[in-house]
């Protein structure tokens, strides 16, 4: 059967050539679409390295002299830094609160960050620097690359040491997390000071649209003792983040706001805003999500048109061959054999077109006309996955395009089909 099928495909090469060219063109276009979608979705669903469920951000403000409750700082013996520490203490005793942290340009999805240059021996990379209190690791549930719990990491963070992401020097130097632990790091702010790495965490991403490959950070302690002498202007730039207990009932933000005036107005400090990290994430990524949604709709529309094109081509082709199918049945072939013959013929045309399409796809990737992923445009794993998905999608389109008209044609008696021909 195979020899006969190959011979028939060759004998009908003039009509098959147009179908083959269509399959080649569609395969290349569809692969580009699949590859772009694969990169976008792979980046979006990468592990974030933190957990923002049940977490909240508090923006602390200060009263102005026009406020009736304003206290002249010159009449007080304590500074705003002491007030912020008292606020932390009261928040930790508030019902349903599991952990409270103090940080600077560090909490996820804040849209603001501080940078530095981290260097180990002669190897260095630009990265973000997070200045946080130890409870920050508990609030956002950072985990160590060697299985350290957030509580363990919190105990390791102290003065004069660093906690870093395991991908700090992976992109350029392929230095893994286990190779960084225990090493000494120099920061661009002070190249004479040595910072020992006491722990390495799993990679931490900046947001959902930046891949792990481009997210590098080092973490320093922001001790509560250092906040004592902060002024009211300094306090406004601090970040207070809260994690509630898993069994916390709904309405935590409302309860916190209701208690803010009586319990959390200390000196000239007051709550300006309380928001969940989920809301902050949505607001920060609104434009990116809209672009992703538009991209997915565009890709879906293109796939639908490709599907209709292939479906129509093979539907029309199958309809034209009703008399041929009837002749096979009248010569002793079963309906199942005729049906399998049509499917195999379509897939053989696809396989031959795909082989040529692979060379075109590889050259497109080599020319860097596709999105970058993890620092490269062409990797074996990515290429195999996207080409496989492309082949499967096109195979389904071909099978569906043959299945329905062939099924209808099989219901007609061979004599009737031949008489119509």
Image: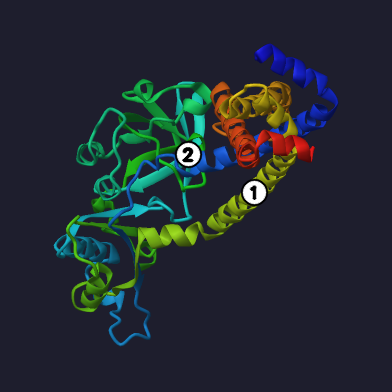
Q: Is residue 12 left or right of residue 326?
A: right
Q: Secondary structure at mark 2?
A: loop
Circles 1 and 2: CB distance less than 8 Å? no
Dot 1, how many residues are within 10 Å of its Cα: few (below 14), some (14-19), or many (20+)? few
Looking at the picture, does residue 182 appear above or below residue 397?
above
Distance (Cα) linking label 1 and label 2: 36 Å
At which x and y percent is residue 129?
Answer: 42, 43
Residue at left offset 26%, top offset 74%: 254
* Quarter of the rendering containing residue 99: bottom left
> Nearer the N terminus, badge 1 or badge 2?
2
Q: Is residue 351 left or right of residue 101?
A: right
At which x and y percent is residue 170?
Answer: 47, 26
Reading the image, the residue beneath label 2 is 215
* Quarter of the rendering containing residue 364: top right
Q: Is residue 126 left or right of residue 254?
A: right
Looking at the picture, does residue 280 appear above or below residue 326?
below
Asked whether residue 127 is in view, the answer is: yes
Looking at the picture, does residue 312 appear above or below residue 165?
below
Looking at the picture, does residue 196 appear above or below residue 297?
above
Q: Is residue 320 left or right of residue 407?
A: right
At which x and y percent is residue 22?
Answer: 77, 34
Observer-nearest of 154 and 34: 34
Residue at left offset 82%, top offset 23%: 13
Observer-nearest of 366 and 242: 366
Reading the image, the residue beneath label 1 is 304
Figure quadrant of the C terminus: top right
Residue at left offset 49%, top offset 59%: 284
């Amino acid at each position: 059967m195979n020899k006969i099928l190959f011979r028939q495909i060759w004998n009908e090469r003039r009509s098959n050539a147009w179908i083959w060219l269509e399959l080649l063109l569609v395969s290349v276009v569809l692969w580009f679409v699949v590859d772009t979608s694969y990169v976008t979705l792979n980046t979006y669903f990468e592990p974030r390295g933190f957990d923002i469920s049940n977490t909240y951000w508090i923006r602390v403000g200060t009263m102005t002299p026009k406020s009736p409750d304003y206290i002249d700082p010159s009449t007080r013996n304590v500074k705003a830094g002491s007030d912020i520490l008292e606020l932390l203490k009261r928040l930790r005793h508030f019902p349903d609160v599991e952990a409270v942290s103090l940080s600077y340009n560090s909490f996820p999805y804040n849209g603001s960050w501080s940078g530095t240059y981290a260097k180990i021996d002669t190897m260095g990379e630009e990265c973000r620097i997070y200045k946080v209190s130890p409870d920050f690791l508990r609030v956002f549930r950072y985990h160590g690359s060697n299985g350290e719990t957030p509580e363990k990491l919190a105990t390791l963070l102290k003065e004069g040491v660093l906690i870093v992401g395991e991908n700090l020097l992976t992109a350029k130097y392929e230095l893994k997390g286990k190779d960084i632990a225990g090493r000494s790091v120099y920061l661009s702010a002070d190249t004479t000071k040595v910072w020992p790495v006491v722990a390495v965490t799993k990679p931490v991403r900046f947001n959902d649209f930046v891949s792990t490959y481009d997210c590098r950070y080092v973490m320093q302690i922001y001790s509560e003792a250092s906040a004592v002498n902060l002024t009211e202007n300094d306090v406004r730039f601090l970040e207070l983040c809260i994690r509630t207990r898993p069994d916390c009932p709904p309405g935590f933000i409302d309860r916190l706001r209701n208690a803010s005036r009586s319990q959390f107005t200390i000196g000239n400090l007051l709550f300006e805003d309380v928001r969940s990290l989920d809301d902050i994430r949505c607001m920060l990524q609104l434009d990116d999500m809209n672009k992703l949604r538009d991209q997915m709709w565009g890709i879906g529309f293109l796939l639908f048109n490709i599907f209709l094109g292939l479906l129509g081509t093979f539907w029309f082709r199958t309809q034209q061959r009703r008399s041929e199918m009837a002749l096979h049945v009248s010569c002793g072939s079963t309906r199942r054999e005729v049906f399998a013959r049509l499917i195999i013929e379509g897939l053989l045309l696809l396989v031959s077109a795909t082989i040529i399409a692979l060379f075109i796809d590889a050259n497109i990737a080599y020319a860097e006309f596709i999105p970058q992923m993890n620092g490269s445009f062409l990797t074996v794993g990515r290429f195999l996955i996207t080409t496989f998905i492309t082949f499967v999608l096109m195979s389904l389109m071909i099978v569906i395009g043959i299945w329905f008209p062939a099924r209808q044609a099989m219901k007609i008696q061979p004599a009737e089909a031949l008489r119509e021909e």
